[in-house]
Each structure stands twice: as structure tokens, then as C-alpha cells.
Image (cartoon, rainbow, N blue to C red):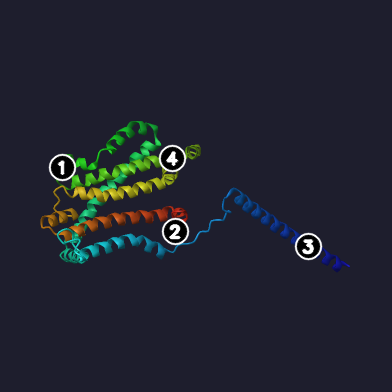
Amino acid sequence: MTSVTTEATKAAEEAEAIEEAEAIEEVKATTTATATATATATGLVAPRPPVRRPRSRTRSLTVRALGPVALLALWWISSATGLLTPDVLASPPQVVTAVGELWGNGQLPDALATSLTRSGIGLVIGLAAGLTLGITTGFTRLGDELLDSSLQTLRTIPFLSLVPLFMVWFGINETAKILLIAVATTFPMYVSTSGGVRNTDRKLVEAMRSFGLGRLAIVRQVVLPGALPSLLAGLRLSMTLSVIALIAAEEINATEGIGYLMSQAQSYARTDILAVCILVYGLLGLTADVLVRGLERILMPWRTAGPGGGTR
């Protein structure tokens, strides 16, 4: 008798489960039919859930390389067909030969080391100044009132216009070159830092204060992590500007560096060496951008999964 009751109970439970499944399917079908009917009635397309297709790293790099490869092919074809003569711009094979010549006699490694030293020291000074000033004006009202208007005025002055003044103040030595790069890289970092700090959630800051955190601890643990996207954007702009400022700085009576190689090549009409120097400047800027992208992947890994990441 007990076994019969148990089997009856199991049968009832199975029947209830089947009925529930059928009810769920009926609700789904009704919902889909309603959405389709509504879309048809209003002339809209029936909604479809977005499907993300993963993009391989190899494919992404291939797509990124298409532009530079196309430019190189156009340059090569123009030189081969005579549209670009050597007195206007050397051909790619001539540029490769010039790279071997400069690298073999040690001129290119020495010039590259000198230029990287100038750019690196100036960039570090500019980043430190921009970060400090940005935190000061963005986090404190007094700092904003005292400094922001003056810094915004100085920011509008083109740094290239400071070259003659720096030559008068500091002479034609390395100090003028490094400080010119520092000035050029300070203001992008300042603007990005100040904006990122101002956008920090004030309620979160007040909550941390109520827990007893001091100003420095709040800046280190709350403000800077919250402003990290803006900080990295400022870092990218500053690193790019450091290369641009390096070109201007090495025009100040340089006796070594990539700019010195360019001035020497200009004197002897060596378009192949001029092209090498231009490519070196471009590669320095590209390397800076790649480094910042790497920092973004390390410090903000969640951003790579968004629409701008590698999953579309």
C-alpha cells in the first residue's frame, strides 16, 4: 500500500513539473509573440539580443597594421615609379641603408640615447609638476582659487614661443632643452588631473573623512584611484607632447641628439638621414602610446571588456 502511495505521489509531482514547464514555455511564447506583433505594428524590427563575437589578438594587430603598411607601400611605389625623386624624399631601401650606416658608425645609438635622456627627464619633471598642481587645485578650494586662473593663462601660451626666452635665461645648454620639455608636458597632465580629481565622488570623500582618514590618505586611497582614467589620458598626451617638444628643444644649438643629426643631414641634403630621423621621432611617439595602453590594461583591466575593447 505504501509503495502505491509513493508512486502516486511521484506521478503527481512529475505531472506538476510538466505543467510548470509548459506554463513557462507558454509565457515565453506569448511574450515573444507580443513583442513581434508590437514591432510589426509599429514598423520596427523584432528585438534581438546582442551577440558579442570575440576578436583574436592576431586579427586586431593585423587590422592596426594595415594603415602603416599601406603608407609604406605607397611610399615604395612612388619612389619606384619616379613620382618621388631622391632629392625630395629617399626611397625605403635608401632609408634602410642609411639606418645601417648610422647604426654601424655609432651615430644613431648615441643620438637616440641623448634624445631619450632629454625627453625622459623633462617628462618626469612635467608629470610631477602637473600631478601636484592638479591635485592641489582639484582637491582644495584655496588651491583652485589661488592657482587655477594663472595656470590656465599660462597653458594658452604656446611652448614654442618660450624658446627664445629660455635661451636668454638658461643659455644654450641642456637646462633650457629639458625645461622646455617639462613646460610642454606639465599642462596636459595638470588639466587631466584637475578634472579627474574634481569628478571624484564627494560623498565617498566625506565618508572616508568620517572614518578618520587624513587628507593624504584620502588622496592616495580614494581620489587618485577614482581619477585614474583621467590621469592615464593626461599621461598619454604628455608623453606625446614630450616628443614634439624634444624636436623643438633640439633646435636650440644642439651638438648631439636626433635633432643634431637632422641639422647635419639638412646641411648636406641627405634626405635619407632626414627620413630616418623623422621615423625615429614617430616611433618614439608610437612607443609612448603603446606603453600607456599597456598601463591601461594593467591598471584598468575592466575597460578592455567594453565596447572599445577586443570583444566586438
Tag 2: amino acid: Gly
Residue 129 at what x, y percent from top left?
A: 30, 42
Please indicate whether residue 200 sits to the left or right of residue 272 in the image.
Answer: right
Mark number, residue 199: 4
Q: Secondary structure at mark 1?
A: helix
Q: How many marks?
A: 4
Q: Does the CB distance between marks 1 and 4 fall below 8 Å?
A: no
Identify the residue position indicated by label 2 in the image. Answer: 310
Tell me the distance, in whole angstroms, between the alpha carbons under discs 4 and 2. Answer: 28 Å
Tag 3: amino acid: Ala
Query: Does label 1 or label 2 sit earlier along the sequence?
Result: 1
Identify the residue position indicated by label 1 in the image. Answer: 167
Q: Does the CB distance between marks 4 and 2 fall below 8 Å?
A: no
Residue 312 at what x, y percent from top left?
A: 46, 58
Tell me the distance, in whole angstroms, between the alpha carbons under discs 2 and 3. Answer: 48 Å
Identify the residue position indicated by label 3 in the image. Answer: 15
Query: Does label 4 or label 2 sit earlier along the sequence?
Result: 4
Query: Does label 2 or label 3 sit earlier along the sequence?
Result: 3
Label 4 packing within 10 angstroms: few (<14), some (14-19), many (20+): some
Tag 4: amino acid: Asn
Of tags 3 and 4, the one toward the viewer is 3
Tell me the distance, in whole angstroms, between the alpha carbons under discs 1 and 3. Answer: 92 Å
Residue 14 at what x, y percent from top left?
A: 77, 63
For residue 4, which quarter of the picture? bottom right
Of tags 1 and 3, the one toward the viewer is 3
Of tags 1 and 2, the one toward the viewer is 2
Q: Does the CB distance between marks 1 and 3 fall below 8 Å?
A: no
